[in-house]
Amino acid sequence: MERGAQARSAPGAMRELVGVWLRILLAGGVVAIILAVSGGFGTGVLTMAPRMAYWLGLTALGTTLGITAARLIVPRDWFDRRFWAAWG
């Protein structure tokens, strides 16, 4: 019976992980849009399409690297005990 319970909980855990990634990537996308519209860090010399592509790509890459580093370096229970850090 335990094996079946573990098999049923695995999709739920995967769904939660995907949800976390999507929320973080969405937040990065919002930051990218703000930076693209404002022309942040000297990108105002570009037209809107390349500027948007630049910022979306850069924030997606940075977000992905940050999530991966956090998962590999920081123990999972550290985030469970420090909810404010997980949000940050």
Image (cartoon, rainbow, N blue to C red):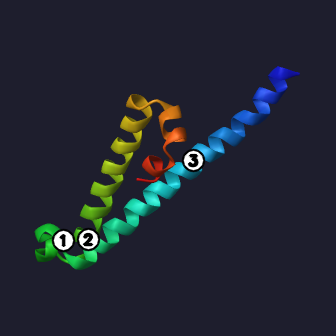
Up the image or down, 56 lies above or below 46; here it is above
Label 2: element kind: helix
Q: Could you classify mark 1 by the number of other residues whose Cα lies within 10 Å: few (under 14), some (14-19), or many (20 or more)?
A: few
Q: CA distance from mark 1 to mark 3?
A: 30 Å
Disc on res. 18: 3
Q: Position of residue 22 (x, y in %)?
A: 51, 55
Disc on res. 74: none
Q: Position of residue 78 (x, y in %)?
A: 48, 35
Label 1: element kind: helix
- For the point 27% across and 55% down, the residue is 58
Q: Could you classify mark 3 by the number of other residues whose Cα lies within 10 Å: few (under 14), some (14-19), or many (20 or more)?
A: few
**Three-letter code, disc 1:** Gly
Image quadrant for the N terminus?
Answer: top right
Q: CA distance from mark 1 to mark 2?
A: 5 Å
**Three-letter code, disc 3:** Val
Residue underneath mark 2: 35
Q: Is the C-beta separation of discs 1 and 2 under 8 Å?
A: yes
Q: Position of residue 27 (x, y in %)?
A: 43, 62
